[in-house]
Every structure is written in C-alpha cells, then in structure tokens.
Image (spheres, rainbow, N blue to C red):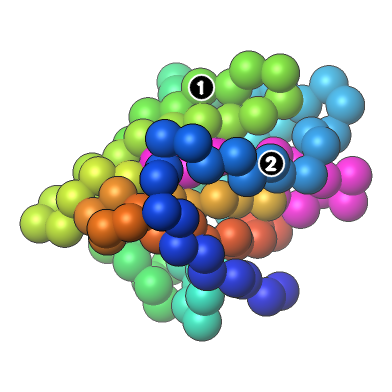
Amino acid sequence: MACTTRTVRNPHTYSHILSPPLTGTSKSEFTGTWLVTKEDSTSFWTFSADGTFRKYRTGEPANGDVHFTGTYSVKDGRLSGQFTNTGVGNGEIKCTIDGDGMLLMEFIEFWHSPAKHVDCTGIRED
C-alpha cells in the first residue's frame, strides 16, 4: 500500500479526483475502524455514525491515545472531513471506498505552505 505526497501551489484550485466511489456508498459504509497507511506509517481511524472521527497515534491500538478528532459528512459516496491537529494546524480529509472495499483517502495538511496532499489507503478492521 503505497502513498504519494504532492505539493500543490494553490489549494483553492486543486482538482485532485479520487477514484469513483463504490456505487451506493453511504455514511454507514464508512462507519467503523480502519487501519490507514499514510506515507511510512499506519494508524487506526474510527468513523462514528454521528459524523465524528478519531485518528489514533501511530503504533497505538484502536483504543489507544487519540492524536486528533474531527467531523465528517458523506455526499454522493464521498466523505469530506475537517480536523485540527493541536499545536500544528488544520487539515482536511477526502475519502472514497473502491470496488474492493479499500478506503482511499486524501489527507490534506494546511499547516504547510503550499498545502501538502498525501494519498493514503485503509483496510477495514471491523
């Protein structure tokens, strides 16, 4: 599961498109715990039915130390979320689920200038 990092000059005109979502993908399809690979690390992410998510610290179990939390919504099979990484800055995630059930995530770090975009993948854990 490889990740690529892209630096974008103007994040307001960024036109990265994730793979087409799995037909009929709803909020319930994202709900649960995923093991997400970002660059050279893995961490658990839990998406709750109430529209909140938790990202656990790298190497921590799914009930370990929380790194940050955020909120999300799902529209047309695509998840969009926002978070604050305390002491670092704000970020955004965009996700789809492909036909094989893999989570495809674009992790956007606005604390870099220009914003840093990292493609990540996730495998459902529950």
Q: Disc 1 designates what residue?
A: 73
Of residues 76 and 34, the one nearer the viewer is 76
For the point 51% across and 82% down, the residue is 40
Q: Can you say whether 114 is above or below 95 in the image?
A: below
Q: Which mark is residue 17?
A: 2
| Among numbered discs 1 and 2, the one appearing first in the sequence | 2
Of residues 108 and 120, the one nearer the viewer is 108
**65 magenta-colored:** no
For the point 71% across and 18% down, the residue is 76
From the viewer's perspective, is 98 left or right of 55? right
Q: Position of residue 66 (x, y in %)?
A: 28, 56
For the point 40% across and 59% down, the residue is 116
**101 magenta-colored:** yes
- Say what amino acid the circle numbered 1 marks: Ser
Q: Residues within 10 Å of mark 1 (few under 14, many from 20)?
A: some
Quadrant, the N terminus: bottom right
The quarter of the displayed image where residue 91 is located: top left
Q: Position of residue 81 (x, y in %)?
A: 44, 33
Q: Secondary structure at mark 2?
A: loop
From the viewer's perspective, is 72 left or right of 90? right
Q: Can you say whether 125 is above or below 101 in the image?
A: below
> Which numbered disc, 1 or 2, marks the residue closer to the eye?
2
Q: Secondary structure at mark 1?
A: strand
What residue range appears in magenta?
92-103
Q: How far is the residue under mark 1 from the one under mark 2?
A: 17 Å
For the point 68% across and 51% down, the residue is 104
- Say what amino acid the circle numbered 2 marks: Ile
